[in-house]
Image: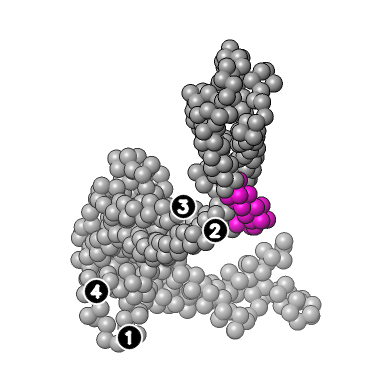
Amino acid sequence: MEEIISQLLSSLKGIWKYRWQAIIVMWLVATLGWIRVATLPDDYQTSARVFVDTQGILKPLLSGMTSVPNLEQQVSIMSRTLLSRPNVERVMRMVDLDLHAQTPRDREMQLDELMSKIKIGGTSSYDIYTISYNNKNPKLVRDVVQALLTIFVEGSFKGKKGDSQKAVQFIDDQIKSYEDKLIAAENNVKDFKLKNNFLLPRQGIDYGSQLLMSSDALNTARLELLEAEQARNAIKAQISGDEPVLGTELAPANIDNPEIDGRISALNKNLDALRMQYTEIHPDIVAAKRLVAQLEERKLAESKLRGADPDPGKHYSPMLQQLKVALTEADARVAGIKARVQEYEQRNARLLAQSNAVPEVESQLAQLNRDYQINKENYEKLIGRREAAKLSGDLSSTTEMMSFKIIDPPTVPLTPVGPNRPLLYSVVLAGAVLSGAAAALLISQIRPTFLSPSQLRETTGLPVLGTVSMNWTPVEQVKRRRGQYVFGAALSVLFLAYGGVMSATLLH
């Protein structure tokens, strides 16, 4: 610690020894610095504050109909991209700064300077944005801020209109593509149905149901053929001389009752038609069969009441002729039913032969229908999205979605905001004092002298036996005192000059 203090005292003594060189350096640095600060151009600044109201009434009203644009994000992005190169170049053209650029290098320098001096600020909670600019020309400052404000408002109103138009164009192209796909899918389904018409379901009835109905119809036709053949055989037996059986053992089909036979025949035809559509357990089929059974029982009961035929010569009477006519009708009925049975057998055989191909056909049809349904759903969705995109584009560019309110418009500044000359004058004075002290210390190090016995002893390594004090004469004492006064006066005048430039700056 003592060594540090000793070194510090030695440095101060060296500075004091070359104090005149220090005061000259102080005056030189201070004079040049103050002149430089005084000649600095004034810096003017203006700013504009704008409030963006994004809480319009259209936003909640149309939120369920279309994709409402994110206005807060849109304005925030616009504020961040306001200082892009195209926008700054546009500002230069609007305020005629580009007319002063003689070469491309000058233009780049102007562009860089303009971008460095423009400041954009904003608050995320209240949507208030501030645009400020500094320059030595107060009118240019106002014009630049006004141009930036115009670009900001215009860019925000444009919004994403261009993006929406591109989106609508893209959706139109996709709609055209899906429309072609939909037409192709419809044609494929139509051609497939025409090609496999007999294997496809009809009126909600699948192939298995068709096969079951065909089998039921075939069995019914065979049963009816058997009944018709038995009835014909009974008529033949009567014609050949067999005694007709009229008792309880006689079958209903062998009993001649035209009225009831006509009703039974009509019911059987209706029953055949029902069996083509429904199964045996259907209520209509059950009711028809029950009614036929009742009529047959009534036919048997009436035949019992009539008893034996009183005409012993019936085989040689007109009754025989009626039996022959009945036999002819029975033969015709048997032939018709046989034709029906053959048709049902062919139809059933064809269905059985094609039954193995039905699952593949149904699978292919399901695939075609699935492709058609997918294309149809996408097509309908794209139609709806196109209208939503058009509405969203119109909504993005409308002035009702957001409004701009200029809180503080840009004005021509009357007083400069810089440079801070009082601070710069103080910095120059401090730099001058430090420069003078540093210069004196440097000279003392370049031209070293021994200022104390200890310093001489440490430097030479020799013992110091004693010191001789300086005996100042009266003339030297007066001269020395006069030099101190002059040094103090020079230092005081330096601070007075500092006070003078500070006063002039504050009064100006």
Tell whether label 1 touches label 3 (CB within 8 Å). no
For marks 4 and 2 on the same chain, the one whose residue lies earlier in the sequence? 4
The three-letter amino acid code for the residue at tag 3 is Glu
* Image location (x, y in percent) of residue 195: 52, 61
- In this view, the mark in front (4 or 2): 2
Left-right relation of 168 to 42: right
Q: Which residue is mark 4?
A: 93
Q: Quadrant of residue 358?
A: bottom right
Q: Which residue is at the far top? A: 305
Helix, strand or loop for disc 2 = loop
Helix, strand or loop for disc 4 = helix
The three-letter amino acid code for the residue at tag 2 is Asn
Q: CA distance from mark 4 to mark 1?
A: 15 Å
Q: Which residue is mark 1?
A: 104
Q: Which residue is mark 2?
A: 196
For marks 4 and 1 on the same chain, the one whose residue lies earlier in the sequence? 4
- In this view, the mark in front (4 or 3): 3
The three-letter amino acid code for the residue at tag 1 is Pro
Tell whether label 2 touches label 4 (CB within 8 Å). no
* Image location (x, y in percent) of residue 64: 38, 42
Q: Is residue 350 magenta?
A: yes
For marks 3 and 2 on the same chain, the one whose residue lies earlier in the sequence? 2
Pick the quarter of the image with the C terminus.
Answer: bottom left
Helix, strand or loop for disc 3 = helix
The three-letter amino acid code for the residue at tag 4 is Arg
- Residue 377's tag is 3
| Mark 3 neighbour density, 10 Å: few (under 14) some (14–19) many (20 or more) | some
Q: Tell me if I can see residue 23 in this picture.
A: yes
- In this view, the mark in front (3 or 1): 3
